[in-house]
Image (cartoon, grey):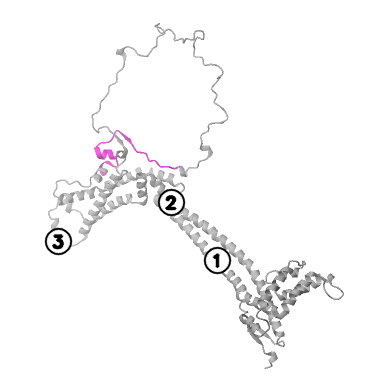
């Protein structure tokens, strides 16, 4: 193969070392470049207005090849300063010609251009590409985060509505709705008391079973349940003392609702115009007490004369009507139910818990009895109830199963989430605040997620804008790098009799 056509392959990363090793430049070239850069910084301060110069000075690092183009432009803009000998008198031209002379001395321009090419290929272009790729990644993350926020907002709203539904409120004004819901407790308790009347057969079975198994004539069996079945949900006073009170003074719940009330200026007391004074009448004169100004004595009238004597409305003693006072008997008869005694049995925490305990006791007995009846061939059970009364023996598993379902139904009425919250509200007014805060915290999570969603959306927009601004910058630096690569290859080729020069390792970086 002809040596003239043999290509010279140089890796871009080794280009500077290659130039130094072939003695095209000196090893001290960085100091020469520093001096040239100072002159370029000074010369660039005084430049004519020209679109091509503006294009050359923007976007990338100024190198020797840019300086050549600037001199060509100055030949047009500074042609008036040219003398008869062909020399330019313009200081601008002199400064840039001096820069070119220093560049060409010892081929400093070639090494600086090679170093600039290496920096663009290895750092500048990949760095901008990484920023663009990171921007795309950030936008994808923002999309995922925004989707997660939307889902989280929907979940928090759903949980809030579910919790409100369990309690039995709409959730618009929580405290007011809870107080209104508390007013439904008497109806709920009345329904429970009415349903407990269906448990008479179950309680009777339990009572007969205890009478047979326990060595007592009439053991006390579920007393509160029996009382409620007979009398209903009456006051605790009646349960304690055996008679209804004459009057009931129920304790009042002190629940603060100010945080849900809109306070405006219209809610304030109107005292009228503060600038006006109260009209007390004519204060210039003196008060007339009906005295004789001459004597200064008060005229009390003639109290001794009969016609003007004071009539106190009292006739003869015999004419006074009498009122018979009935003194009630001492003790609790005709008493007043106050405080906890004024509460109904199911409203009062202590008696309500006792009622629920008795229901669980009855449920446990029926469950055990049903298990025994469903067990076939139990010799022990047969022998045990041989001498039992007919009321204990005369029931089937289906009958006990019905009784058990009735007991569970009453227990379920008192065990719902709504009833549990109402019990806590009735026993502790502060629980209203805690429950309201718990519900509002669900919405607060949604509010925070909404803020995060807005922030993610804004970050995505900012990143997209930054990415759009980087794309022209990347295209410009790639174009300038390709130009620089071709110039370097051309100048190296001239030094080797125009042999083709291949600068390898830059192709991948130069792709958009």
Q: Earlier in the sequence, mark 3 or mark 2?
A: 3
Q: Please name whichever residue, 192 or 343, is drawn nearer the observer in this view of the structure.
A: 343
**Which quarter of the image is occupied by the C terminus?**
bottom right
Local secondary structure at mark 3: helix
The correct choice, above or below, for 91 with respect to 506 in the image is above
Q: Please name whichever residue, 47 or 346, is drawn nearer the observer in this view of the structure.
A: 47
Give the Cα separation between the discs numbered 3 and 1.
Answer: 77 Å
Q: Please name whichever residue, 151 or 97, is drawn nearer the observer in this view of the structure.
A: 97
- Residue 245's disc number: none
Q: Earlier in the sequence, mark 3 or mark 1?
A: 1
Asked if residue 291 is among those painted magenta in the image, a careful observer would answer no
**Which quarter of the image is occupied by the N terminus?**
bottom right
The correct choice, above or below, for 444 with respect to 111 in the image is above
Would you say 440 lies left or right of 510 here? left
> Which segment did they paint magenta?
229-257
Q: Residue 222, how many percent across, how many down?
A: 23, 47
The correct choice, above or below, for 149 with respect to 65 in the image is above
Local secondary structure at mark 2: helix
Q: Residue 169, how many percent across, how many down?
A: 42, 48
* Residue picked out by circle 2: 439
């Amino acid at each position: 193969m002809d040596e003239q056509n043999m290509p010279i392959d140089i890796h871009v990363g080794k280009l500077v070392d290659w130039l130094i090793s072939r003695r095209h430049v000196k090893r001290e070239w960085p100091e020469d470049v520093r001096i040239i850069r100072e002159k370029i910084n000074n010369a660039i301060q005084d430049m004519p207005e020209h679109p091509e110069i503006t294009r050359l000075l923007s976007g990338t690092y100024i190198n020797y090849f840019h300086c050549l183009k600037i001199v060509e432009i100055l030949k047009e803009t500074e042609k008036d300063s040219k003398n008869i000998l062909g020399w330019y008198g313009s200081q601008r031209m002199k400064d840039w010609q001096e820069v070119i002379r220093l560049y060409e001395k010892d081929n400093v321009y070639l090494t600086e251009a090679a170093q600039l090419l290496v920096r663009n290929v290895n750092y500048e272009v990949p760095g901008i590409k990484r920023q663009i790729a990171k921007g795309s990644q950030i936008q994808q993350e923002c999309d995922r985060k925004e989707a997660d926020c939307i889902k989280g907002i929907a979940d928090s709203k759903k949980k809030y509505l579910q919790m409100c539904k369990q309690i039995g409120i709409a959730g618009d004004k929580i405290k007011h709705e809870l107080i209104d819901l508390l007013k439904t407790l008497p109806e709920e308790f009345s329904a429970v008391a009415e349903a407990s009347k269906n448990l008479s057969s179950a309680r009777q079975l339990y009572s007969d079973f205890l009478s047979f198994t326990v060595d007592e004539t009439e053991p006390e069996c579920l007393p509160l349940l029996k009382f409620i079945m007979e009398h209903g949900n009456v006051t605790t006073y009646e349960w304690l003392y055996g008679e209804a009170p004459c009057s009931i003074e129920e304790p009042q719940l002190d629940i603060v609702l100010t945080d849900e009330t809109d306070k405006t200026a219209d809610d304030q007391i109107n005292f009228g115009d503060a600038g006006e004074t109260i009209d007390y009448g004519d204060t210039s004169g003196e008060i007339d007490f009906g005295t004789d100004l001459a004597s200064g004595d008060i005229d009390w009238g003639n109290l001794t004369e009969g016609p003007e004597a004071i009539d106190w409305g009292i006739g003869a003693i015999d004419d006074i009507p009498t009122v018979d006072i009935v003194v009630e008997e001492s003790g609790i008869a005709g008493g007043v139910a106050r405080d906890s005694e004024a509460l109904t049995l199911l409203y009062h925490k202590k008696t309500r818990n006792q009622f629920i305990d008795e229901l669980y006791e009855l449920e446990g007995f029926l469950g055990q009895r049903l298990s025994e009846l469903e067990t076939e061939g139990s010799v022990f059970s047969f022998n045990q109830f041989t001498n039992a009364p007919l009321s204990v023996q005369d029931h089937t598993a289906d009958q006990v199963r019905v009784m058990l379902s009735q007991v569970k139904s009453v227990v379920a009425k008192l065990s719902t989430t709504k009833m549990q919250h109402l019990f806590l509200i009735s026993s502790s007014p502060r629980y209203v605040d805690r429950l309201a805060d718990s519900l509002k915290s669900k919405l607060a999570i949604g509010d925070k997620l909404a803020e995060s969603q807005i922030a993610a959306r804004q970050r995505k927009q900012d990143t997209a804008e930054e990415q759009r601004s980087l794309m022209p910058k990347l295209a410009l630096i790639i174009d300038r790098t390709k130009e620089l690569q071709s110039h370097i290859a051309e100048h190296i080729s001239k030094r080797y009799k125009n042999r083709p020069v291949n600068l390898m390792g830059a192709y991948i970086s130069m792709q958009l």
